[in-house]
Image (cartoon, rainbow, N blue to C red):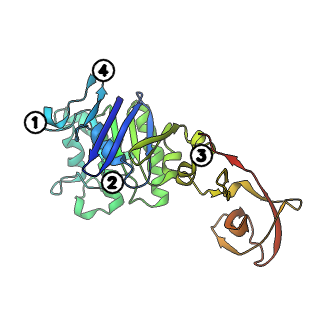
Amino acid sequence: MKIDNISYSFPKAFALKNIKFTLEKGQILGLIGHSGSGKSTLLKIMAGLLEPQNGAVFFEGEILPPPSKKLIPGHPKIKMVTQQSSLFPNISIAENICYEIRYYTKEYQQKRLKYLAKKLNINHLLEKKVSELSGGEIQRAMLAKSLADEPSVLLLDEPFANLDSLNKKRIILELIKVLKSENISCVLVTHEIRDAFGMVDKLIILKNGRQVQTGSSEQIYFSPKNEYVAMLTGEAFLSSDKSYFFRPEDITLDPEGENECEVLNNVFLGASYEVFVEIEGKMVFFYHQKPIETGQLIRVSFLKRSFNP
C-alpha cells in the first residue's frame, strides 16, 4: 500500500498535509501523535472510508476507490478495528467471526475460528453475546473477526485501550505472530508509546497533520528530531536553552559527578524507584533500585543527547 501525497482539511485547519509513505507487505507500522494530529483521519482514508482532497492511496498497484466511487465504502481486503464495537449484538461471538467467512465451507469456518480463538485467547467467549463481554473482551473478539477473512491490511485505531497490562502484552505478542505468519500489513494508531515500541517495524510521528519523523522505534527514541518527538516517545528533560535533552535512564549516581543535588522525593514503581532531584533548576527523576533518603545531597552525572533535525 502506498500513501501518495495525501492531504485533507477541515473548515478551519489542516487534518493532513502532504503525507507520503509506503506500507510494505507484512510490515507493522505505528502512527503516533498528539490528539488532533490526524492519525484517525489518515486511517479512515487508508481504509477507503474517507475521501482525500489531494493525493491518492494505492492498493495492490491500483488507486483505492474513494467513497464517492463505491456503493459501500471500503475494501474487502482492508479491515479496520476501532474502539467502537463492530460486533452484531444478537448472535454469539463465534457466529460474529464466522459471518466474515460465511461464503467458505463450514469446515474452513470452524478451522479458522478454532485457530483465531486460540491465538487471541477467546475460546471461553465464543458462545457468549456482546452484552456478556467486558470492554477488553469485545476488543479481542473484534480483532478475531477482522482477521477471519485473512485481510491484506489491518488498520488498528487504539485497539488495546480497554485491555489490562497483562492481557495487552499477551494479545500484542499473539497478534504479531498472526500478522507475520500470514504476511498481513498493519497500521497501529495508539496513544501508548510502549504498545507501539513493542509491536511496530517502523514509526511515523505526526504533528498538526504533518509528518515530523519516520524511522524505527530505536532511531526515533534515541535520535528524535525535536522536542515534540522526544517528549512524545518517553520521559524527556530539556536543557535550559533547549539545545539538548536527557532521559531518566541517562542520569546516574556518580560521586565524581558535576551536579550536586538534593533528593526531593521517592516514588515506588515496584521493580524500582523514581528518585526526584533538581538539575539545572528543573525537577527531574531517575530510576534506582532502592529509595534514597529525602533531603540527602547526592552527586549525579547525565548523558546529554542531541536532537537529530
> Which quadrant of the view contains residue 292?
bottom right
Q: Which residue is mark 3?
A: 221
**Marks 4 and 2, how far apart in space?**
31 Å
**Separation of marks 1 and 3 at Cα, in angstroms:** 43 Å
Of tags 1 and 2, the one toward the viewer is 1
Instruction: Please state which amino acid type lies under the numbered disc 4.
Output: Gly
Closer to the camera, 11 or 64?
A: 11
Q: Which mark is residue 139?
A: 2
3D distance between C-alphas at marks 3 and 4? 33 Å
Please report whichever mark, 4 or 2, sits nearer to the chain's N-terminal start: 4
Identified at 49% across, 43% down, the residue is 199
Q: Is residue 196 left or right of residue 10?
A: right
Q: Residues within 10 Å of mark 1 (few under 14, many from 20)?
A: few
Category of crowding for the residue at label 4, using alpha-carbon neighbours closer than 10 angstroms: few (below 14), some (14–19), many (at least 20): few
* Residue 300: x %, y % from top left: 80, 61
The kind of residue on which mark 2 rests is Gln
Q: Which mark is residue 71?
A: 1
* Left-right relation of 198 to 283: left
